[in-house]
Image (cartoon, helix red, strand yellow):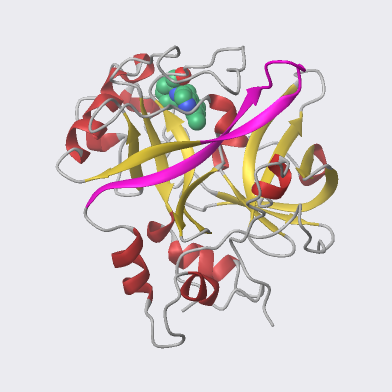
């Protein structure tokens, strides 16, 4: 049968690759200009979903390294969303524009799923219908959206690296945020204008388009924030121990990390971020036609 998506090892002592077997680390080697790192998710046996802004027009597939679990995999192709245009608003004094900030990497070879490498569930696929324990094929894509993106402050999680206190190894932590799909959505989005690079933004909808989900801030609870290195990682909704990706981490108002990694056990009071530190994620429900088209041969059975 089709392998089940969004399933992970849940026992406490499992290492983080097994607890998050879909998380992919991406490094883009730029000779003479160092390496950029981003995150991504495994969505099928050979396709990874990430952010388009991790790449530049000159990057080619063989500069890109993908690590899943402890193993490296060569990349065959990179395809950014056709409407992603980082320089689109430069003439308005807006240096970076993140609309449609999604991309797909195709691996050279299909990978064999294992405890360390398993796909996450995508909206409007048969796998998500099963993960939500809803009847297939009766359940519609709209019903997925109604269930997952209901009105309100929706609990969601993202993954961020951290420094294990004792050894100086890098761990990974799940951080819980609330997607402001409520009366708090407007104030969440309004804080986008507090980014210093966005001082020329006159109307927030210039940079926060329909494609974005907004998290962060201190209402209704203090949300942790993303860092640049989290770009391309998933925004996940957990339903009864099944994990469904609803967003791709795109950009934030404040890079709270700078260079140092947070320690894995520090509580978020110590790392107080300003209340206008908000994060913006591409809503996968808003790029479905592109996902269906590009993933049509991956056996995901879109509904
Ligand atoms: C135009 O600039 C504004 C948007 C991009 N922000 C950088 C950034 C990116 C690129 C990606 C992710 C995931 C980030 N998480 C936190 C910051 C941050 C800067 C602030 O640093 C402000």
**Percent position (x, y) of residue 133?**
45, 75
**Percent position (x, y) of residue 101?**
48, 43
Residue 187 position (above or below residue 144): above
Q: Viewer-proximal residue, 297 or 89?
A: 297
Q: Please indicate whether residue 215 sits to the left or right of residue 33 in the image.
A: left
Q: Please indicate whether residue 12 sits to the left or right of residue 286 in the image.
A: right
Q: Is residue 162 magenta?
A: yes
Q: Which residues are magenta?
A: 152-174
Q: Please indicate whether residue 143 sits to the left or right of residue 166 in the image.
A: left
**Would you say the magenta stretch is mainly helix, strand or loop?**
strand
- Tell me the residue at 75%/42% (across/down): 60
- Tell me the residue at 56%/41% (across/down): 233
Residue 76 seen in render: yes
Residue 154 position (above or below residue 195): below
Residue 112 position (above or below residue 42): below
**Percent position (x, y) of residue 26?**
71, 38
Residue 85 seen in render: no
Residue 225 position (above or below residue 130): above
**Percent position (x, y) of residue 204?**
23, 32
Quadrant hosting residue 14: top right
Quadrant hosting residue 198: top left
Q: Viewer-proximal residue, 73 or 101?
A: 73
How many numbered discs sit on the rendered protein?
0
Quadrant hosting residue 13: top right
Q: Is residue 34 magenta?
A: no
- Tell me the residue at 84%/49% (across/down): 74
Q: Please indicate whether residue 11 sits to the left or right of residue 225 in the image.
A: right
Residue farthest toward the front in the current orientation of the protein: 12
- Tell me the residue at 69%/83% (across/down): 1
């Amino acid at each position: 049968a089709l392998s089940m998506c969004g399933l992970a090892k849940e026992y406490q002592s499992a290492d983080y690759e097994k607890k998050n077997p879909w998380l992919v680390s991406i490094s883009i080697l730029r000779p003479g200009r160092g390496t950029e790192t981003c995150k991504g998710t495994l969505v099928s046996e050979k396709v990874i979903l990430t952010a388009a802004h991790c790449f530049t027009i000159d990057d080619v597939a063989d500069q890109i390294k993908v690590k899943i679990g402890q193993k490296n995999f060569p990349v065959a192709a990179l395809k950014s969303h056709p409407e992603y245009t980082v320089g689109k608003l430069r003439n308005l004094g807006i240096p970076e524009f993140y609309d449609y900030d999604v991309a797909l990497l195709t691996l050279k070879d299909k990978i064999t799923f294992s405890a360390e490498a398993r796909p996450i569930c995508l909206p409007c696929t048969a796998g998500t219908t099963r993960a939500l324990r809803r009847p297939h094929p009766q359940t519609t894509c709209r019903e997925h959206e109604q269930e997952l993106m209901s009105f309100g402050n929706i609990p969601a999680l993202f993954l961020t690296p951290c420094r294990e206190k004792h050894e100086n190894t890098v761990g990974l932590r799940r951080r819980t945020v609330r997607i402001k799909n409520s009366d708090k959505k407007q104030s969440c989005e309004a804080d986008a204008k507090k980014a210093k690079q966005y001082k020329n933004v006159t109307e927030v909808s210039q940079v926060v388009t329909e494609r974005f989900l907004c998290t962060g801030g201190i209402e209704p609870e203090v949300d942790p924030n993303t860092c640049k290195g989290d770009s391309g990682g998933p925004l996940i909704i957990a339903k009864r121990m099944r994990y469904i990706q609803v967003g791709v981490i795109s950009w934030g108002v404040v890079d709270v990390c700078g260079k140092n990694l947070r320690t894995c056990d520090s509580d978020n009071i110590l790392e107080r971020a300003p209340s206008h530190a908000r994060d913006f994620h591409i809503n996968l429900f808003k790029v479905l036609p592109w996902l269906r088209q590009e993933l049509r041969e991956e056996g995901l059975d879109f509904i």
